[in-house]
Amino acid sequence: MIKVSLISLGCAKNLVDSEIMVGHLHQAGMAVIPEADKADVVIVNTCSFIDSSKEESLSHILEVHQSRGMTKRRKEQKLIVAGCMAQRFSKDLSTSLHDEVDAFIGLDQLTKVAPIIEEIYAKERGKQDAPVNFIVGKSTYIPDFNTPRFRLTPKHFAYIKIAEGCNHPCTFCIIPQIRGRHRSRTVESVVAEARQLVKEGVKELNLISQDTTFFGMDTWEQRPNPRTPVDSSRGTALTTLLRELNAIEGDFWIRLLYTHPAHWSDELIKTIAECPKVARYIDIPLQHISDAMLERMQRETSGDYIRDLIKRIRAGIPGIAVRTTFIVGFPGETDADVAELCQFIEETKFERLGVFRYSQEEGTRGAKMPDQIPAKVKEARWHKLMALQQKIAAEVSKSHVGQTLKVLVEEPGVARGEADAPDIDGRVYVPRELPVSEFVEVKITGYQDYDLLALPKGQKPAEFKVAKQAQ
Ligand code: F3S
């Protein structure tokens, strides 16, 4: 039996791709094992978002290669590079990683991974032979609900990829060139998958894609403009999907990740407000607030539009936690742009906020722009924003003390509330004896920066101290 080990890097979208590969390997009767040193084949599912992700991917590839030859089994070991870096750079990498890699597979080969492995095995590779490149053209694949998939997330949460690809022209981003044009799944397909996951005991469905607010719009008869709001009267839309998911029986959260500000609408705000299973949390990367920067980034939004949208979201969905990300150091960013951004952050008090330093990515329009910002300046701006947010985060955390929250227990002693997405946001520390993978009602008793401390309703603080010390 062929033994395969898979290293999954990058974001949740890549993780779903890894899950699809593992599902197909199992289906083909291959064993998937965690130890790369005992495997016949190692797959590195790479990320290529920014320089540091490419470096991380390369270091994993080199590490796997360098350990080959340490045992007899490893001498024969095959190394396959999959994912975003392969999809984008396989031609260049075929030369630079000639000796290290046996094959490259892209996003459209996920379901063919088992026959590809058989093929590589059957062929003896000569020293001069280049790695086999299975990637042809742009990616068009999108999984369906019955695609074999083996979940790699804990029992209680799952990612559902509702669409693939992206039609946005953001000048800093390489992902549309990697993942292709936006293509949505059908509502029926997503609902069938969600139903099955809830049946299996999943308590949190995380909806992901490059732009979840664009869901369904690619199927509309008339092509949506950049600022087209979610509108179910024009065809399938995210609102249709959310209402159908909300109607599935059971106690679970639906979490909306990766929304684009340009496609929000009053209809979407109303839908979330009316669907109690949709978490009071939204992930809405804004990237900047200065008009000059938004224009250069081609974000299809303006400062006034964003300010108004955040107000409408907060007014329309009481208790909503807003998560956003900003980029500092984009070409041409001035001190005045940064001051405007700081003021906006201070006024808006985002419940969750992340900051990226701009990375000059080969193949993007941003990379060719004049007025690139020196690394030192980017670093200083990043620190400024992070320090500002740390203060705000402490205020936000403090405001929860005394409140009762429903949390999902992640592991002994650690839980997450509705306002915390997996692997991104804060934690709620709870007594270790609370049941893992279950919802529990807790009372918030304290906080530490981004994290909260809590007790089950009715438990006394003294009992909690003992549980905390035991952790
Ligand atoms: Fe994700 Fe990295 Fe690809 S962030 S979409 S794995 S480039």
Image (tube, rainbow, N blue to C red):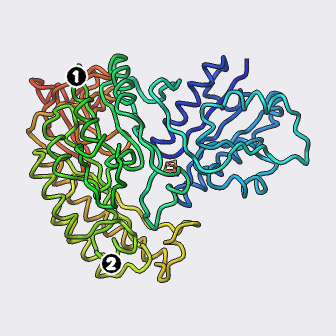
Question: What amino acid type should be assigned to the residue bearing mark 1?
Answer: Asp
Q: Residue furthest front?
A: 221
Using the image as rendered, state which of residue 211 and residue 68 is in the foreground: 211
The total of numbered circles placed on residues is 2
What residue do we see at 31% from left, 48% from top?
213
* Mark closer to the observer (1, 2): 2
Residue 375 placed where, x, y %?
49, 74
Residue 254 placed where, x, y %?
27, 34
What is the crowding at mark 2: few (fewer than 14 residues within 10 Å), some, or many (at least 20)? some
Using the image as rendered, state which of residue 252 and residue 215 is in the foreground: 215
Residue 411 in sight from this viewpoint = no
* Image quadrant where one finds the C terminus: top left
Q: Is mark 1 within 8 Å of ligand 1?
A: no
- Judged left or right of residue 72, residue 184 is left
- Alpha-carbon span between mark 1 and mark 2: 45 Å
What residue do we see at 34% from left, 53% from top?
222
- Judged left or right of residue 413, residue 312 is left
What is the crowding at mark 1: few (fewer than 14 residues within 10 Å), some, or many (at least 20)? few
What residue do we see at 79% from left, 56% from top?
95
Question: What amino acid type should be assigned to the residue bearing mark 2?
Answer: Ala
Label 2 SS:
helix
Q: Are marks 1 and 2 in contact (CB under 8 Å)?
A: no
Residue 186 placed where, x, y %?
39, 34
Using the image as rendered, state which of residue 75 and residue 255 is in the foreground: 255
Residue indicated by mark 1: 251
Using the image as rendered, state which of residue 67 and residue 95 is in the foreground: 95
Residue indicated by mark 2: 292
